[in-house]
Image: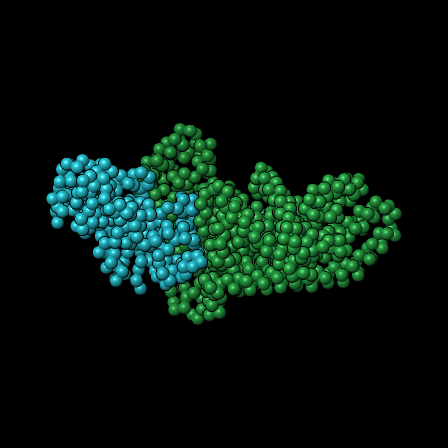
């Protein structure tokens, strides 16, 4: 056997692939309860009995015929990854549902090892699975495991080193289909990394990628003959062939599942868990619970504790009292150039503004938010939230699934924009991106805004009310205006799980690392730009230009600076607002207009770049143009409204 | 009861729809597209199914009953074509017009039961209930209905899924939501929640109306 062994982890979403990956390699990646969030591929390795085993975690997939981009990625890894082994991870509670992928994997002719994961949950459900019989039927090794408890890991590694197969399972498809597969297989003359029967199966299901590949390898004549076989075959069936196959496989797998499972009487399932499971999606009680979750999670924990207590402590106690005086003093003494001092330690310096904001303000807020979000994720609450919100979201052209990116947006809009790719239709992705760009303030912004506005309840609630109204209005209108296929909503509701503390911390940690890699440099760049703009006097000019239209909205000259900085990061602008507000430069009316406009305003540069990356340059620019005009328009409208009704907040 | 020809049935159908759904008691011969002296009119008069005043025709009580039955068969035929045989477009109406005449008493009630005693045709027009529907309300027979009509705790087997784009159908299939699967309804609001095996799924109304289930009793 080779010294270096390559292993792929393959399976449906939500079966604990990532947890198994961590148990095998000892290195952690995001484990998610929500289908589709493990988009990236993670690699790790382990040395076992002097063999280096390289393990790759693939995105979740349901069948060999891909629907989503992630599934396509996973399939390409199986086809072209040159893996020595494929570990097919399945959820032991649902083997009937999981086995269709397993038998498709076995069809590929590659070395398959089946891992029956979450055996403990299956046992609690009263399911007794006969692993030996299952292994005999499938003809490949089957290993029971509980990967979060590291049970079964050693056996998996042993199986890799001593791999043996039996009589491999072959699916009894309809004779017409089997005939076609045999005919096509015989026509394929070249070598392929996977079995010819899998390629033939995919060809009769009109798989584009495989079609192209075969065209390339076998030429036009052969592919035309194959097409003829496919057409003949599809004329026999009422529905599409992939559906016929899916139904057949399901039948086969249900039979297998029945042969290998025995249901015992349920051993005292955890009553509390079942109660929580039910009440969180209850048509009546679900909503007050949602409010409680938001109130305690977002407002109390992220808002008051993160953005309040922690920020205060880190900002004043650590930065203002200890670190900054020391650093500033040191730089004042050791550097003579005024320009450099300006760059580093003056009002908008890299250290005094950039690093201070990033670490003293953003870091605690984002950390508490990601902790909150990871708990929601691991407890299985997010799909429940999707269930509760679907009806409302349909009114704004989205489905319940959009709840994930939108809630995540309250933490980081950039990350959330990336997550919109898990939504089903293009229309949904565009609407969610618009709402994230416009009406969902990120945690950094929220923190600063709350600080600016909280001295007046009227101010705070007006701001919240206006934002919600705009969210609904813009969502409703985009739902009407943007064309696209009809959205449908379906989601798996996983059981409620008590989150594991270590998982929560690791997840928060990986997200924070991502955040700081993506966002932290921007703080520094922004400080640099501001410094450059100031010393070259370009900013003075720009401020004059911006101040002019702002006059019509009734905003003072000083506000121009805030908007200019807001271009770099919304919360930067907000932070500027915070400082100027402390100097008492604005009255409450002006403060409200500015707060609303800054919240709606163009997102930070990182999000803008992400929007273009995910939605393309044209759509990205359109969204940015819309957001800019719309926020100015709303500012103007608000100004007129307050004037006409003579409202003084 | 003697059998009526297709042409006669169509006249009754038009008159019934005019009276019940358009509030027009009488129809002019021009609208009806039949000559006053035509054979069909004579035959209908003979059977005491219609009355003729000047140039207008209206239905007698017997005629109403017959007309209702024709409409019922036509709309059931449409429903059968769309839901089970998966016909679409203009073919629905044309084929239904032919098919309705073959669904004679007795057969139509079987079709009605198979379809789950539907209340409306694919175009949204009401289907007049037959004796089987009235009986059903009392007995609660085994029948096929969309998932959206199941109540909390009811169980059934998926028979077919219709009106969902292929791509989504494939996604549903990959979750195990496909014909043959046994489901149990756990909640119907704000979304539909049901279990298949040990998994639970939430779907919206569109999906719940597309998944047809044969109800099973415990």
Front-most of residues A427 and A518 = A427
For residue A313, which quarter of the picture?
bottom right
Q: How many marks on residues? A: 0
Front-most of residues A131 and A239 = A239
Residue A77, position as x, y percentages in the image: 51, 44
Front-most of residues B151 and A211 = B151
Q: What tint does the image give chain A?
A: green
Q: What residue is shown at x 57% (from left), y 54% (from top)?
A: A468
Colour mode of the rendering: by chain
Q: Which quadrant holds the C terminus of chain A?
A: bottom right
Q: What residue is shown at x 49% (from left), y 56% (from top)?
A: A389
The letter of the cyan chain is B
Q: Is residue A279 left or right of residue A375?
A: left
Residue A598, position as x, y percentages in the image: 66, 49
The reply to whether residue B158 is in sight is no
The reply to whether residue A204 is in sight is yes
Q: What residue is shown at x 64% (from left), y 50% (from top)?
A: A644
Front-most of residues A276 and A540 = A540
Residue A231, position as x, y percentages in the image: 35, 35
Q: What residue is shown at x 46% (from left), y 35% (from top)?
A: A213
| Residue reaching furthest to the front | B54
Q: Is residue B137 left or right of residue B37?
A: right
Q: Is residue B139 left or right of residue A101?
A: left
Q: Is residue A317 left or right of residue A307?
A: right
Residue A563, position as x, y percentages in the image: 70, 46
């Amino acid at each position: 056997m080779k010294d270096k062994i390559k292993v792929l982890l393959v399976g449906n979403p939500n079966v604990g692939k990532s947890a198994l990956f961590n148990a095998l390699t000892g290195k952690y990646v995001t484990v998610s309860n929500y289908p589709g969030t493990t988009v990236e591929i993670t690699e790790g390795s382990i040395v076992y009995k002097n063999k280096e085993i390289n393990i790759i975690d693939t995105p979740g997939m349901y069948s060999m015929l891909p629907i989503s981009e992630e599934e396509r990625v996973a399939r390409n890894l199986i086809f072209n990854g040159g893996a020595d082994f494929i570990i097919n991870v399945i959820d032991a509670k649902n083997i009937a549902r999981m086995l269709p992928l397993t038998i498709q994997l076995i069809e590929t002719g590659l070395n398959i090892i089946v891992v029956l994961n979450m055996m403990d949950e299956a046992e609690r459900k009263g399911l007794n699975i006969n692993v030996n019989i299952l292994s005999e039927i499938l003809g490949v090794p089957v290993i029971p495991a509980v990967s979060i408890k590291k049970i079964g890991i050693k056996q998996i590694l042993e199986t890799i080193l001593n791999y043996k197969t039996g009589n491999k399972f072959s699916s009894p498809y309809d004779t017409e289909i089997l005939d076609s597969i045999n005919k096509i297989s015989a026509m394929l003359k070249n070598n392929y990394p996977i079995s010819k029967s899998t390629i033939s199966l995919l060809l009769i299901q009109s798989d584009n990628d495989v079609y192209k590949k075969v065209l390339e390898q076998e030429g036009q004549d052969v592919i035309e003959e194959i097409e003829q076989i496919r057409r003949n075959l599809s004329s026999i069936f009422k529905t599409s062939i992939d559906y016929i196959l899916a139904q057949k496989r399901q039948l086969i797998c249900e039979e297998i599942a029945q042969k290998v499972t025995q249901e015992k009487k349920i051993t005292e399932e955890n009553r509390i868990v079942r109660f929580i499971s039910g009440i969180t999606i209850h048509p009546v009680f679900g909503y007050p619970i949602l409010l409680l979750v938001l109130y305690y999670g977002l407002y109390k924990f992220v808002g008051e504790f993160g953005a309040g207590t922690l920020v205060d402590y880190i900002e004043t106690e650590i930065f203002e009292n200890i670190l900054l005086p020391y650093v500033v003093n040191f730089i004042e003494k050791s550097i003579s150039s005024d320009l450099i001092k300006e760059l580093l330690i003056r009002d908008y310096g890299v250290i005094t503004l950039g690093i201070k904001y990033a670490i003293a303000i953003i870091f605690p807020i984002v950390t508490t938010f990601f902790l909150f979000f990871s708990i929601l994720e691991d407890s299985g609450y997010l799909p429940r939230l999707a269930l509760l919100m679907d009806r409302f979201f349909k009114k704004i052209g989205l489905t319940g699934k959009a709840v994930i990116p939108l809630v995540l947006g309250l933490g980081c809009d950039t990350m959330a924009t990336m997550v919109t790719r898990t939504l089903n239709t293009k229309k949904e992705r565009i609407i969610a991106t618009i709402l994230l760009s416009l009406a969902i303030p990120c945690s950094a912004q929220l923190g600063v805004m709350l600080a600016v506005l909280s001295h007046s309840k009227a101010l705070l609630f007006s701001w919240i009310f206006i934002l919600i109204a705009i969210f609904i209005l813009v969502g409703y209108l985009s739902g009407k205006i943007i064309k696209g296929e009809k959205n449908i909503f379906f989601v798996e509701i996983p059981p409620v799980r008590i989150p594991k503390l270590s998982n929560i911390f690791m997840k928060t940690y990986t997200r924070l690392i991502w955040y700081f890699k993506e966002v932290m440099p921007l703080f520094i760049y922004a400080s640099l730009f501001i410094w450059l703009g100031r010393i070259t006097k370009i900013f003075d000019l720009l401020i004059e230009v911006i101040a002019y239209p702002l006059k019509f909205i009734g905003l003072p000259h000083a506000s121009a600076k805030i908007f200019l900085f807001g271009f770099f990061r919304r919360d930067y602008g907000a932070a500027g607002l915070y400082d100027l507000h402390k100097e008492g430069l604005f009255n409450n009316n002006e403060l409200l207009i500015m707060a609303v406009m800054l919240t709606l305003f163009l997102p930070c540069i990182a999000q803008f770049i992400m929007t273009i990356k995910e939605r393309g340059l044209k759509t990205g620019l359109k969204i940015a143009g819309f957001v800019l005009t719309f926020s100015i328009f709303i500012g103007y409208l608000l100004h007129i409204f307050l004037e006409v009704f003579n409202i003084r907040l | 009861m003697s059998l009526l020809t297709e042409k006669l049935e169509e006249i009754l159908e038009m008159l019934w729809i005019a009276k019940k759904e358009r509030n027009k008691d009488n129809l002019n011969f021009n609208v009806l597209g039949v000559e006053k002296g035509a054979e069909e009119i004579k035959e209908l008069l003979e059977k005491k199914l219609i009355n003729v005043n000047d140039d207008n025709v209206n239905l007698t009580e017997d005629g109403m009953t017959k007309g209702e039955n024709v409409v019922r068969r036509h709309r059931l035929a449409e429903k059968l074509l769309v839901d089970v045989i998966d016909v679409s477009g203009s073919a629905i109406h044309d084929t239904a017009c032919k098919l309705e005449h073959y669904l004679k008493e007795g057969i139509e009630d079987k079709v009605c039961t198979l379809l789950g005693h539907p209340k409306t045709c694919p175009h949204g027009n009401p289907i007049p209930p037959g004796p089987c529907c009235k009986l059903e309300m009392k007995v609660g027979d085994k029948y096929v209905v969309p998932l959206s009509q199941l109540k909390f705790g009811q169980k059934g087997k998926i028979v077919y899924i219709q009106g969902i784009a292929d791509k989504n159908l494939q996604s549903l299939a990959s979750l195990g939501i496909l014909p043959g699967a046994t489901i149990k309804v756990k909640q119907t609001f704000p979304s539909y929640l049901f279990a298949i095996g040990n998994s639970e799924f939430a779907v919206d109304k569109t999906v719940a109306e597309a998944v047809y289930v044969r109800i099973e009793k415990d």
